[in-house]
């Protein structure tokens, strides 16, 4: 593995640590726990996309659920794939590696798959995994278009597989506690909800020339249904997030986590309209395509929801680089991954001092997933595919407003926009012989 690849994996680990996540495994303790599980009780797991959150998801599963064992790894980058296989081998775990996820899905010994690939691959891989009889843990956002979100919901319903979406904040106890307080009504009427992500560590991406793909990378497979383009290092690995071909920028990367709780807190379905304004304000000459600065206003019945994001700035609302606030007549509840508090408006209510985070959301999210894999009680999933599709669709509404430059209005009954230009951006545009799954 070359120096750049090593440093990429190191930097990914730092980013995960910043989210309160760890990929460290106590192999001795894990082996001892798994030794008590008989062969018939084992759940065979495979991972598609072995970097970043894919790896964090797998190691969390192995560490927290003794019944699970990994028997397959798949990635288009041999360098990273072989490194992950080596890491598992250090703990005495042997796995089969695949370059093509379809061959992995043919393995009938695999019970469930974790999908940690770039966003533009999520739909195809999740649908085909369900068709192959696998349960699925799929990273957020579930799709890169509203059409894909709908197809993924339809696949889960048709094949009746357990599908958990990687919005693990839903499993953080203090998030649940904050929503319980919100539903008490003590804030009074909530007229504005804000969600934001100010990511100071996300700096400019310098323009780089196209080049040959690195040795060991199946670039054609990496592109999959995305448009055929020459390889460019800026579009590969982590930075795919900032290109429309593969993802939706910070709106879908962090937005699905935070807007999810804005929707949950208000029992909201879909907004009547959305208008988004922003652009490449921080780095107008940067290589990224998605806006580094964006403000989006969603109009719901009786209140507004506002999304804000900014790269290279850390000082967001209430001095927090991310969060959700519910602003009521009596006070404001402020919630982030570290905890929650209530700030009273004058003397209309009692303050609530900061209530800290109580544990690992990802640990509990994985445990919830496996409990449903065993029970088959799909309603017990903390974040089922329907919930992932809901928030991903709302985020797509904001991005579609930004792309069209117009306010967009939504017809919930018809499941589409009232504007022709906006409806032209609802469907995915697959290339290279791929088609959006018809379920």
Image: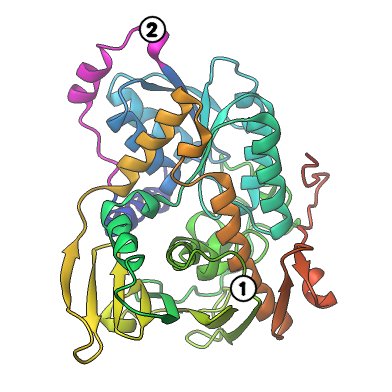
Pinpoint residue 114: horizontal percent, then vertical percent.
50, 36
- 315 magenta-colored: no
Please name which of the two marks, 2 or 1, marks the residue nearer to the observer.
1
Q: In the image, which residues are magenta?
A: 22-42
Q: Regarding mark 2 in the picture, which secondary structure is present there?
A: helix
Residue sticking out furthest to the top = 39
Dot 2, crowdedness within 10 Å: few (<14), some or many (≥20)? few
Judge by depth and name the residue closer to the eye, 83 or 187. Answer: 187
Q: CA distance from mark 2 to mark 1?
A: 49 Å
Is 51 located above or below residue 41 in the figure?
A: below
Residue sticking out furthest to the left = 353
Pinpoint residue 346: horizontal percent, then vertical percent.
21, 92
Task: Name the residue at 40% across, 29% down.
Answer: 371
Pinpoint residue 2: horizontal percent, then vertical percent.
42, 46
Residue 114 can be seen, yes or no: no
Judge by depth and name the residue closer to the eye, 280 or 330. Answer: 330
Specify the quadrant that holds the N terminus.
top left
Q: Quadrant of residue 41?
A: top left
Mark number, residue 271 = 1
* Residue pointed to by mark 2: 39
| 376 displayed left or right of 145 | left
Task: Name the residue at 42% across, 65% down.
Answer: 265
Is 268 located above or below residue 435 in the figure?
A: below
Is 15 located above or below residue 346 in the figure?
A: above
Pinpoint residue 225: horizontal percent, then vertical percent.
74, 49
Residue 239 can be seen, yes or no: yes
Judge by depth and name the residue closer to the eye, 419 or 53. Answer: 419
């Amino acid at each position: 593995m070359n120096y750049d690849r090593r440093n990429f994996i190191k930097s990914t680990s730092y980013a995960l640590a910043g989210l309160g996540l760890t990929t460290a495994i106590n192999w001795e303790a894990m082996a001892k726990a798994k030794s008590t599980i008989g062969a018939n009780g084992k759940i065979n797991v495979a991972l598609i996309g072995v970097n970043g959150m894919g790896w964090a998801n797998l190691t969390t599963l192995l560490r927290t659920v003794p019944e699970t064992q990994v028997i397959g790894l798949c990635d288009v980058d041999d360098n990273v794939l072989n490194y992950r296989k080596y890491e598992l081998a250090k703990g005495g775990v042997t796995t089969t590696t695949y370059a093509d996820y379809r061959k992995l899905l043919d393995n009938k010994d695999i019970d469930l798959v974790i999908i940690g690939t770039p966003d533009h691959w999520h739909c195809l891989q999740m649908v085909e995994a369900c068709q192959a009889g696998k349960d699925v843990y799929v990273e957020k956002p579930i799709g890169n278009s509203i059409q894909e979100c709908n197809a993924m919901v339809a696949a889960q319903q048709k094949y009746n597989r357990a599908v958990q979406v990687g919005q693990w904040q839903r499993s953080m106890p203090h998030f649940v506690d904050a929503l319980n307080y919100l539903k008490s009504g003590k804030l009074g009427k909530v007229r504005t909800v804000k969600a934001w992500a100010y990511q100071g560590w996300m700096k400019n991406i310098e323009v780089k020339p196209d080049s040959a793909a690195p040795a060991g990378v199946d670039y054609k497979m990496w592109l999959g249904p995305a448009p055929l383009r020459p390889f460019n290092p800026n579009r590969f690995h982590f930075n795919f997030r900032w290109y429309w071909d593969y993802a939706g920028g910070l709106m879908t990367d962090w937005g699905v986590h935070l807007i999810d709780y804005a929707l949950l807190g208000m029992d909201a379905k879909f907004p009547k309209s959305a208008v988004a304004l922003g652009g490449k304000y921080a780095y107008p000459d940067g290589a990224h395509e998605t806006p580094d600065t964006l403000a989006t206003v969603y109009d719901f019945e009786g209140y507004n929801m506002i999304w804000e994001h900014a790269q290279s700035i850390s000082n967001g609302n209430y001095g927090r680089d991310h969060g959700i606030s519910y602003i009521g007549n009596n006070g404001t509840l402020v919630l982030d991954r570290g905890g929650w508090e209530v700030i009273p408006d004058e003397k209309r209510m009692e303050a609530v001092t900061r209530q800290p985070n109580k544990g690992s959301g990802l640990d509990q999210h994985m445990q919830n997933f496996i409990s449903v894999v065993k029970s088959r009680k799909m309603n017990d999933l903390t974040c089922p595919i329907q919930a992932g599709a809901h928030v991903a669709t709302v985020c797509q509404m904001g991005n579609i407003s930004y792309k069209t430059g117009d306010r967009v209005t939504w017809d919930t009954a018809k499941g589409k926009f009232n504007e022709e230009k906006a409806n032209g951006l609802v469907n995915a545009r697959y290339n290279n012989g791929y088609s959006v799954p018809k379920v």
